[in-house]
Image: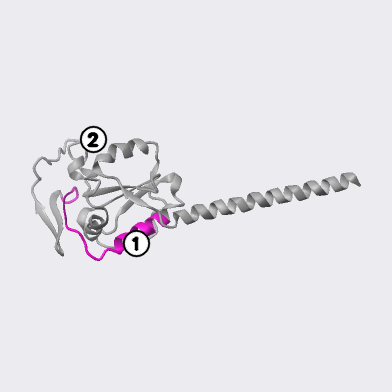
Amino acid sequence: MNNSFSLSKQIRVRYWISTLFLVLFLLISSSAFAQFEEPEITKITKDRRAWFMERFNDIKWTGRGLYNETDLDDRQTNEIRARLQAVYGDPTQTIKDLINKQDFRPGKAIQFEYWFTVNDSIPMMVLDWDGPFGSGLTFVGASRYIDLMPQVKRTFARKLMAIEELANYQDYFYSPEREQWFNVAYNNGSYTTKEISSPAGMSIDFSN
């Protein structure tokens, strides 16, 4: 009889311990989810690029978790660039910052890149994929955070689409397919994409 009573008591204790752990897990999970409902997205400035690369040097970059479409994806990239300028200011880097590096190749030619940290711990990059001739952006993030990235992208897109007044900008873009340089700009409501010769100090070494 005592053995039966002791066994029953042990079962009840284990049940309540399991229930307690479940409740704690749900509370922690709910708190973490609530904190991430509105992620804080911070742009990395040009002078912090080295810090960013060192901080996230072991990251496996992927687009997974960032493929879900938003209203932003159907917009022309030149419009998105003006929205980015309005919300986050100048890009983290442009082709001007890359072209004179030893490992630069024409196929790596981009118009702009914006680097971000999300909640100070999650890295993300956005960049154009065909300068002013494309639509949407290329998004890349860390593979370990793919479950969180859909919400990050939705928040990011919502902030950009909420902008009513676009900001002026001026970039250069080299198109390997067209073998042509372009001056790309938005100024007071007008978009321009003009064919130009190589900008000063930005000639491409095609032997690489």
Determine whether 72 is above or below 32 in the image.
below
Determine whether 94 is above or below 33 in the image.
above
Where residue 124 appears, x then y in whole percent? Answer: 35, 48
Amino acid of disc 2: Asp
Q: Which residues are magenta?
A: 151-178
Determine whether 86 is above or below 62 in the image.
below
- Is any part of residue 73 visible from this angle? no
Crowd rating for badge 1 (residues with CA inside 10 Å; few <14, some 14–19, many 20+): some
**Residue at point 20%, 43% (across, down):** 106
Q: Is residue 138 magenta?
A: no
**Residue at point 34%, 62% (across, down):** 158
Q: Which mark is residue 158?
A: 1
Residue at the far top: name it. 102
Crowd rating for badge 2 (residues with CA inside 10 Å; few <14, some 14–19, many 20+): few
Q: Secondary structure at mark 1?
A: helix
How many marks on residues? 2
Answer with left or right where residue 3 lies relative to residue 25: right
